Image (tube, rainbow, N blue to C red):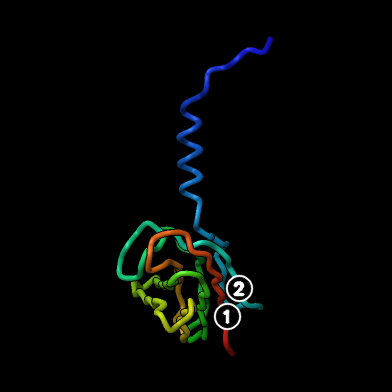
Amino acid sequence: MATLRPLNWFALPTAIALALGLSGTAIANPIQTPLSTNVVVNGSASGGQSGDCGYVSSTPTQVVRVTEDFTSLRFSVQGSGQPTLMVTGSNGRTQCVMADRFSQGAVEIPGVWERGTYSIFVGDRSQGNHPFTLSISQGN
């Protein structure tokens, strides 16, 4: 006859918290310039923080370390819903671009970047889970 063991009630809340904390965030390993190839990260935008750049996660989607001044990079997002793209630099400066009804779910931030570390966040203008593809490319 099988013996029933009591359910460990501490394991269930821990498992739920881990699942909720990790869901929706695509966290890739930090990268640094120069990039030998384009970097592509797929994920789901489902942040809980509402701010000037929509609903973004508190954890960056990608971290980029720029190793030399005047590096040309392009951060592009294609997603369902109305994606937002936020780049925060080590100098505290934040840039945000939000999709509108004309962008068809595509937003990008191109530019020439100074040496430093940049945190890239992909979010959405509305709350919920929205699949996206983040592409990072380096120009010549």
Picture layout, residue 38 above or below residue 125: below
Left or right for 65, reference 1: left
Relative image position of residue 90 (x, y in whole percent)? 39, 70
Q: Position of residue 121 (x, y in %)?
A: 44, 67
Callout 2 amino acid: Val
| Residue 35 placement, left or right of 105 | right
Quadrant where the N terminus sits is top right
Q: Which numbered dot is residue 49?
A: none
Q: How many marks do you count on the picture?
A: 2
Q: List the residue tagged with mark 2.
A: 39
- From this viewpoint, which residue is outermost toward the right? 1
> Residue 130 appears at what percent x and percent y?
49, 64
Picture quadrant of residue 99? bottom left
Mark 2 or mark 1: whose residue is earlier in sequence: 2
To which residue does mark 1 refer? 137
Classify residue 128 as left or right of residue 51. right
Residue displayed at 39% across by 71% down: 88
- At 45% across and 34% down in the image, what residue appears? 13
Mark 1 lies on a secondary structure that is: strand
Q: Residues within 10 Å of mark 1 (few under 14, many from 20)?
A: some
Q: Secondary structure at mark 2?
A: strand
Q: Residue at x 43, y 84 (%)?
A: 102
Residue found 38% across the figure and 65% down from its top: 126
Which residue, as the protein is rendered here, is positioned at the far front? 101
Amino acid type, residue under disc 1 in the picture: Ser
Q: Is residue 64 above or below residue 100?
A: above
